[in-house]
Image: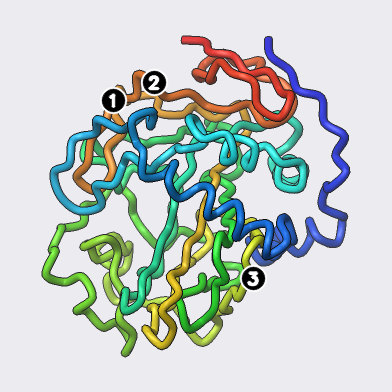
Amino acid sequence: MNQITDTKKFSLSAEELEKFQRDGYIGPFDLYEKDEMEANLQALRPKLLNTKKAIYGGGRAVSGNTNLANYDRHLDIDFLADHITRPEIVDRVSSILGPDTLCWRSEFFPKYPGDEGTDWHQADNFSNVAGSKHPQIVWPEDADFGGTITVWTAFTDASVENGCLQFIPGSHKTMNYDESKTMDYNPDAINATEKNGIRRGFFGHDYRQLQKDPNWSPDESKAVSQVMRQGQFIVFWSTLMHASHPHSGLTDQMRLGFAGRYLPTSVKVYPYSTELEEFGGQASLDRFGNVLTSGTDTYGHNRFVDSTVNGHPFRTNQ
């Protein structure tokens, strides 16, 4: 049994928890000062370019979003390993999920000048992105909900002009998409498709193909733009309807977000998979491991990395 002791200095208040349960998100919160985050980012860039130690560095590209080498870089880059275990993040996550939590995934989300916005979407078990159609995460049968907690950190300023996130508050309680359906890949549609008058896409796919009701469309009049300064983070359910604005190109600054995804240790991660499959890219999960971020793992059905980060011991079990 592995255990981490936490002080819970940054736990959500009762009022914040009530707001989170109502809206599906909370924040933004301050984590780094702007100058501090910029210095961290400059130091991080050359490490991101070096994928020799990345656990998916030998991934096989087929089509679509194939940059798997920069998934889960918290497993080989110290700054990102420290970031996902920061108490400012973990204390708030465990306020929502309970005392025993893990981080199973991290991803970068860059948006460059002229890039389209991201489609409105929700994610429950993440099976729609995998060619095998197997769920990537499986909650216990008696769980009241699914999905994952996403902590999205602004590594650069995120504005409406450069493509910040958008949420539809309260939409996390109903799944509007069927993740067992398939999306077709069309590279010619990238940056060339308008939806409700806005350029949107999903890595060469059209998320509308997963709609349970093909005649349904999200009520964008309720959308809230999540403007964030560099160094802030926001917490939301993956089942929340979320999207992003297009990058207007009016500024030459890219928008870069970093998302850590968290679960209670009771949830099974990649229970049916030996490979990570994402939008046409494949990579072996042989070097993958979850990170225990708070509390204890008493289930033993997940693999954990064997290292020490932020003074916290982690283990590997097969």
Badge 1 is on which residue? Answer: 284
**Horizontal and vertical percent position of residue 270:** 40, 28
Q: Nearer the viewer, residue 143 or 196?
A: 196
Question: On the rendered structure, is 199 left or right of 79?
Answer: left
Q: Name the spot of residue 230 as percent of width and height, x first.
A: 62, 66
How far across and down, in percent of the image, does residue 169 sit? 61, 71
Q: Are marks 2 and 1 in contact (CB under 8 Å)?
A: yes
As displayed, is residue 191 above or below residue 186?
Answer: below
Instruction: Characterize the local packing of mark 1: few (<14), some (14-19) or many (20 or more) Cα atoms within 10 angstroms.
Output: some
Q: Quadrant of the N terminus?
A: top right
- Look at the picture and state if 168 lies above or below 264: below
Task: Say what secondary structure mark 1 lies in.
Answer: strand
Task: Name the residue tied to disc 3.
Answer: 229
Residue at 11% from the left image edge and 70% from the top image edge: 188
What residue sits 21% from the left and 62% below the top? 204
Q: Label 3 near label 2: C-beta < 8 Å?
A: no
Seen in the image, is 92 located left or right of residue 72?
right
Q: Nearer the viewer, residue 142 or 250?
A: 250
Q: Give the SS element for disc 2.
A: loop
Q: Which residue in the structure is indicated by mark 2?
A: 287
Amino acid type, callout 3? Arg
Total numbered badges shown on the rendered structure: 3
Q: Tell which of 111 and 5 is nearer to you.
A: 111
Nearer to us: label 2 or label 3 = 3
Give the Cα separation between the discs numbered 2 and 3. Answer: 34 Å
The amino acid beneath tag 1 is Ser
Q: CA distance from mark 3 to mark 1?
A: 36 Å
Mark 3 vs mark 1: give the one in front. Answer: 3
